[in-house]
Image (spheres, rainbow, N blue to C red):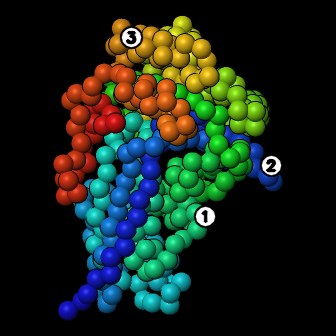
């Protein structure tokens, strides 16, 4: 009888990007890169039962449609077996989570990273973030930097490496989340992504200017400057995404006194960004929610980029917004993940 050794792992999600484009690395080489907006809340959890003696190809995953996570588990088994001097083996990977699919919130990256961490835990290992990033990119071709915690980093998503650590934390923000396109999931694999080979010198210069401004925003704690960067990046992203509500979103954000907007560059989720230190924040957020409703843009979740315990106002506004209806999400780990029309947040 083959006995199993169980390991567990978790990974968060994000709320789309603050900045995405083509940038220069330390050697002056062009790289596709992004900076994500972290969000506490839903994430992926994984449990891996390692079966010593079982053939490596005898590795199953539930739900069965999580093929990227399954590939990541196979790669992680090979890495961990090499480090411990054991032969690779099969096992059973089980994933749970409530991240909506197709909205650009990193659902597949979260699954992959949780799977890698669960496999490593079954071997009694804790892999360094750079190794997790490398395995994630090999498993899904491009990965979000969810293995790095909440630090703002410019991350080369196709290479699994950090181009720049922008600072210890983003400026404090209050984010009113919403879903463009009625919250309809986007087939992210069908979207063209920034390609270093296709970018012209003007594109790279524009991205590098935004990178410098974001670096300054983080260094000075300026929500206003961060909002300007996010809005400019989101506007550039519309050349590919073409959300019909984007212009209305920027107008209502300006009228509500927001510092800007951000979007998922490979999905439908978006956010209206507010400076929590601005006067009349409650009024601004409520006005934003009313305006979103008037334009038929579903509001999803209001959250902050700083701990709610440090700001009573953040606790209060997190309860504002319409209730979520029509959410379609997995009932359990054996239920295939189905696209959510509205974010299950």
For mark 1, give the secondary structure: helix
**Which quadrant holds residue 212?**
top right
Residue 234 location (% of width, % of height): 57, 26
Give the crowd class for mark 3: few <14, some 14-19, many >=20 residues within 10 Å.
some
For mark 2, give the secondary structure: loop
Q: Where's the C terminus, which quadrant?
A: top left
Q: Which residue is mark 3?
A: 290
Q: Which residue is mark 2?
A: 28
Of residues 149 and 154, the one nearer the viewer is 149
Callout 3 touching callout 2 (CB < 8 Å): no
Residue 141 location (% of width, % of height): 50, 55
Mark closer to the chain start, 2 or 1: 2
Of residues 255 and 241, the one nearer the viewer is 255
Give the crowd class for mark 1: few <14, some 14-19, many >=20 residues within 10 Å.
some
Mark closer to the chain start, 3 or 2: 2
Q: Which residue is mark 1?
A: 130
Give the crowd class for mark 2: few <14, some 14-19, many >=20 residues within 10 Å.
few
Mark closer to the chain start, 1 or 3: 1
Residue 193 visible (yes or no): no
Of residues 264 and 286, the one nearer the viewer is 286
Q: Is residue 93 above or below residue 330?
A: below
Q: Residue most toward the right?
A: 27
Q: Is residue 72 above or below residue 308?
A: below
Residue 31 shown left or right of residue 177 in the figure: right
Q: Where's the N terminus, which quadrant?
A: bottom left
x 44%, y 38%: residue: 104
Residue 314 location (% of width, % of height): 48, 29
Measured Cα–Cα span from mark 3 to mark 2: 46 Å
């Amino acid at each position: 009888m083959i006995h199993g050794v169980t390991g567990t792992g978790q990974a968060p999600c994000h709320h789309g990007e603050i900045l995405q484009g083509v940038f220069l690395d330390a050697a002056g080489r062009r790289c596709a890169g992004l900076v994500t907006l972290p969000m506490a809340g839903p994430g992926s959890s994984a449990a891996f039962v390692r079966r010593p003696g079982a053939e490596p190809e005898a590795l199953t995953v539930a739900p069965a449609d999580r093929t990227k996570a399954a590939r990541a588990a196979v790669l992680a088994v090979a890495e961990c077996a090499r480090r411990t001097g054991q032969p690779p083996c099969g096992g059973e990977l089980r994933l749970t989570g409530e991240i909506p699919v197709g909205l650009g919130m990193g659902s597949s990256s979260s699954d992959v990273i949780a799977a890698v961490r669960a496999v490593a835990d079954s071997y009694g290992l804790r892999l360094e973030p750079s190794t997790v990033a490398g395995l994630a990119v090999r498993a899904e071709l491009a990965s979000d930097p969810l293995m790095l915690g909440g630090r703002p980093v410019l991350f080369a998503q196709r290479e699994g490496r950090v181009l720049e650590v922008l600072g210890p934390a983003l400026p404090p923000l209050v984010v009113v989340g919403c879903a463009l396109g009625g919250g309809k999931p986007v087939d992210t694999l069908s979207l063209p992504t920034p390609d270093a080979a296709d970018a012209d010198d003007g594109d790279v210069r524009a991205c590098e200017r935004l990178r410098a401004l974001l670096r300054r925003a983080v260094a000075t704690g300026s929500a206003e400057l961060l909002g300007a960067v996010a809005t400019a990046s989101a506007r550039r992203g519309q050349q590919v995404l073409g959300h019909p509500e984007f212009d209305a979103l920027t107008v209502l954000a300006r009228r509500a006194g927001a510092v800007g907007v951000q979007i998922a560059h490979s999905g439908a989720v978006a956010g209206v960004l507010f400076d929590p230190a601005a006067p009349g924040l409650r009024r601004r957020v409520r006005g934003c929610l009313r305006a979103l409703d008037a334009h038929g843009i579903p509001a999803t979740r209001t959250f902050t980029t700083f701990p709610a315990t440090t700001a009573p106002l953040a606790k209060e506004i997190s309860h504002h917004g319409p209730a979520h209806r029509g959410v379609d999400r997995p009932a359990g780990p054996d239920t295939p993940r189905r696209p959510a029309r509205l974010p299950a947040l």
